[in-house]
Amino acid sequence: MKKLDNFPYSNVLVLGLAKSGTAAANLLLQNGKNVRINDKKVTDNDKIVQELKSKGADVITGSHPLSVLENIEIIIKNPGIPYDNPIIVEAETKDIPVITEIEIAGNLVESSIIGITGSNGKTTTTTLTTEMMAKSNQPVKVAGNIGYVATEVAQTLKDDEKMILELSSFQLMGVKTFKPKIAVLLNIFEAHLDYHKTFNNYKNAKCNIFVNQTQDDYLIYNADDPVVSEAVSDAKSFKVPFSLNKRLENGAWVDESSVYFRNEKIIDRSEIVLVGNHNLENILAAVCAAKLSGANNHGIREVLTTFSSVRHRLQYVESIDGRLFYNDSKATNILATQKALSSFKQPTILLAGGLDRGNNFDELIPYLRNVKGMVLFGETKEKLKKTAGDAGVELIKTTDNMEEAVKEAYNLSERDDVILLSPACASWDQYSTFEERGDMFIQAVHTLM
């Protein structure tokens, strides 16, 4: 097991267990730290609580009393806990630093990390990069927001392995010293303002992926995104841009026929099976990260000629009676749905709706030209119904659940239509995760067969 060498704190509060908190607590205990854990959602009788107590942890459950801060030098916070939590607010008044679990992972294997973030495309880019490196016989492991706890993976990382981290703004907001050897910034647009409060806070969290980098590190960024381009202008890292619109001597780019890295042709565009210009951006970012990490063109081409989608991200599900069903449940914001709609020229039936975060959906209107019908659900269905009417969508239905929505979409559709779940909203009004929502869609599609 790797040791924490540059972690000068002895008394640590782990706020929130779940997978990342449990992993961080175990690592700290193994390194001889005094660990206090606070989680109001668990009880003293839970198995994991008993295990951590047996290892020496002080565990407080059921509430968040301010007394948990007594003698604490640093807090490792579950990314989902907001910064207006009373304990975090009180910690700030006491100048107690608050970090997330990725900071610990960075302490273990900083020089081996490829970090990937952006408002959209993180998982696809992370998966593409991982596969490109694996197909090129470059040892690699994946972790972070994609489902594997970074500290657990970091502890077992071999000297010749790279760790690819998918990083959310929630994780990055807690950065103090973390820096990946290669940082990838895909895009930045307004998202998660219920958590970050302002766009500037959100943007700064995303930019934490490169804020501690030096000239010996690489920063891969989207040269077509003006917010990103402005944000990276003062970065100290060696910058590697990617673009769909211009030739780049030191990055990845495309022309009408091919994909290039610097001046080297990588693949013909006609051979790529992943659909959508937004995915072409993800491909360019992945090519940069993979090439800088030692991947070869053969491995990259093998991935791009076979990789069609990530589950719940513009995932092809089935063809039924000539209708093509796609699951894009990960589209939890308007931009993601815009990009999904832009991927198809066929007449489309759009399934959308979910958690109401207070925004309207007027920005969808220019992207609804090929949408002949919309089936709407969740808290936002009436808002989306108004948007559909303003856009001139002919067929509009509201439903109460996914099974009804899929049946209605099929009834509205004709042969050669696309039936697309791309909600433009988070899932939490009806489903615990976007994965659960996507699985319900897939299940409902299969009942039509």
Image: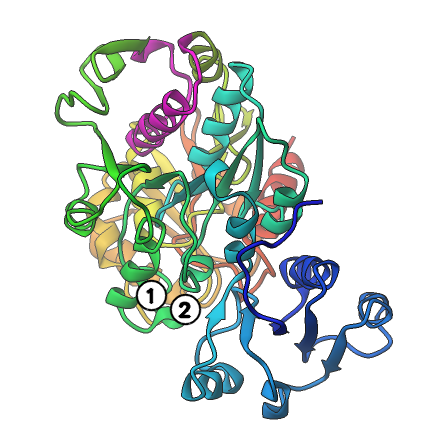
Identity, as a three-letter code, of the amino acid under mark 1: Lys
- Residue 152 pos. (x, y %): 66, 48
Q: In the rendered image, is residue 403 in sight? A: no
Q: Does dot 1 land on a helix, a strand or a loop?
A: helix
In magenta segment, residue 397: no
* Residue name at image x 53 percent, y 85 percent: 87
Q: Quadrant of residue 170?
A: bottom left
Q: Nearer the viewer, residue 28 or 279?
A: 28
Q: Nearer the viewer, residue 430 or 237?
A: 237
Horizontal relation, residue 347 to residue 164: left or right: left
Q: Residues within 10 Å of mark 1 (few under 14, many from 20)?
A: some
Q: Which residues are magenta?
A: 268-297
Which residue was labeled with disc 2? 356
Q: Residues within 10 Å of mark 2 (few under 14, many from 20)?
A: some
Q: Earlier in the sequence, mark 2 or mark 1?
A: 2
Horizontal relation, residue 246 to residue 391: left or right: left
Marks 2 and 1 sit apart, C-alpha to C-alpha, by: 9 Å
- Residue 288 pos. (x, y %): 33, 26
Q: In the rendered image, is residue 200 in sight? A: yes
Q: Quadrant of the C terminus?
A: top right
Above or below — where is 180 with respect to 257? below
In magenta segment, residue 287: yes
**Tag 2–tag 1 contact (CB < 8 Å):** yes
* Residue name at image x 24 percent, y 43 percent: 367
- Residue 203 pos. (x, y %): 28, 59
Q: Does dot 2 land on a helix, a strand or a loop?
A: loop
Q: How is the image coloured?
A: rainbow
Q: Does the magenta stretch mainly form a helix, a strand or a loop?
A: helix
Identity, as a three-letter code, of the amino acid under mark 2: Asp
Which residue was labeled with disc 1? 383
